[in-house]
Amino acid sequence: MFPAATPDALPCGPGQCPDLWKPVSYETDNEQSHRQVVIAAAIGAIVELVVFTISQVTARNLYIILGGLAGAALALVLQRYWLAVQLTEVKITIPQVSEMTFVVNNDARQVAWKLYVETATRVST
């Protein structure tokens, strides 16, 4: 047979030949599928426990839980689609007088924000 290879006999050391020093996984497909089934069953049991617990709640607490879930869902939807929808222009039409189109660019956004902050933080005397 061949003599055992030592790190000194190889042309590269640990970290230089990653394929030679990589640990070998002896897990079979059967063991992996068993693990996936167990994890899926645990997740299913937790989800069903949460659903059952919520279904047992009545009156005010139920409205609080459902309101929180609805708020979280709305926040996720807004986060996902907020950047995709942006105002680019505003068109104002006054019948029998004229039509005006305002293009919204970065400078206009900055001016509008400064005006908003100025009016929102103004203290009336």
Image (spheres, rainbow, N blue to C red):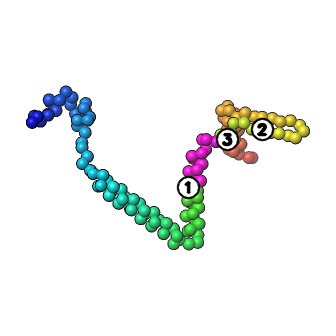
Q: Mark 3 to mark 1: distance in Å?
A: 28 Å
Left or right: 82, with 43 as reference point: right
Q: Amino acid at mark 3?
A: Val
State how far apart marks 1 and 2 are (Cα): 34 Å
Identify the amino acid type marked 2: Lys
The residue to which callout 1 is attached is: 72
Q: Nearer the viewer, residue 17 or 73?
A: 17
Judging by the rendered image, the residue that carries numbered circle 2 is 91
Q: How many marks?
A: 3
Image position, residue 62 (x, y; %): 56, 68
The residues colored magenta run 74-85
- Residue 46's tag is none
Which quarter of the rendered picture does the N terminus lie within?
Answer: top left
Question: Compared with residue 84, is residue 75 higher up or lower down, i.e. above or below?
Answer: below
- Which-is-in-front pick, marks 2 and 3? 2
**Sequence-wise, which precedes: disc 1 or disc 2?**
1
Q: Secondary structure at mark 1?
A: helix
| Residue 14 appears in the figure | yes
Q: Secondary structure of the magenta portion, mostly?
A: helix
Instruction: List the single residue furthest toward the right.
Output: 96
Return the residue at label 3. 117
Q: Position of residue 28 (x, y in %)?
A: 27, 51
Residue reaching furthest to the top: 11
Residue, x 71% and y 42% (percent of image)? 119
Front disc: 1 or 2: 2
Could you tell me if the residues under marks 3 and 1 are in contact, i.e. CB atoms within 8 Å?
A: no
Q: Give x and y (percent) for residue 110.
A: 66, 34
Q: Position of residue 12 (x, y in %)?
A: 21, 29
